[in-house]
Image (cartoon, helix red, strand yellow):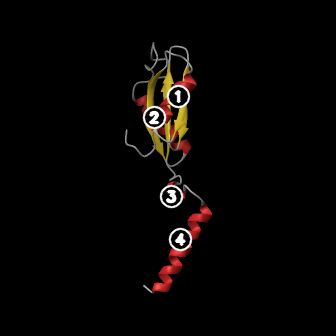
Amino acid sequence: MNKKLLTVIQAVSVATALLIGPGAAFAHTGSYDSIAVDDTRGSRGGDAGYGVGTANTPAAAKQQAMAACAKAGNDSCQVMLTYTTCGAYASSRTKYGTGTGDSERQARAAALASCGNNGCQITVSDCVGVPD
């Protein structure tokens, strides 16, 4: 390849990256995860039944999560959270909370904080693109 052409291509690539902004290399890939939960199943925090779904649209991820929750033997599933990074669901006998974050650890901490009860336990946590 012509050295001048290569230099121009590199310059355009750098300029494009600067215009798009930081984080462009980690832009959303079009994958969503959802968590559906049947919280009537458990008698204490963390006992809820659940299902996780992954798809290219939020609606499809919700459908897959509902199907996975039902397939696991749960009768009263509800989609609690749809996310593009990491998500978590925490519950106690009387409260629940959801959280998202850039890591599973962050999502779990956010879910526990959202639950707001010392009896809350993580029921499920998941990150997009990480196999279940």
Question: Disc 3 designates what residue?
Answer: 25
Checking the image for residue 13, the label placed there is 4
Q: CA distance from mark 3 to mark 1?
A: 28 Å
Q: Secondary structure at mark 1?
A: helix
Q: Secondary structure at mark 2?
A: helix
- Tag in front: 1 or 2: 2
Quadrant the N terminus occupies: bottom left
Q: Earlier in the sequence, mark 1 or mark 2?
A: 2
Q: Earlier in the sequence, mark 4 or mark 1?
A: 4
In percent of width and height, residue 11 lies at: 54, 75
Question: Disc 1 designates what residue?
Answer: 111
Front in this rendered view, residue 18 or 62? 18
In the rendered image, the residue lying farthest to the right is 19
Determine whether 75 is above or below 30 in the image: above
Q: Residue at x 55, y 43 (%)?
A: 58
Q: Secondary structure at mark 3?
A: helix
Q: Earlier in the sequence, mark 4 or mark 3?
A: 4
In percent of width and height, residue 111 lies at: 52, 28
Question: Disc 2 designates what residue?
Answer: 105
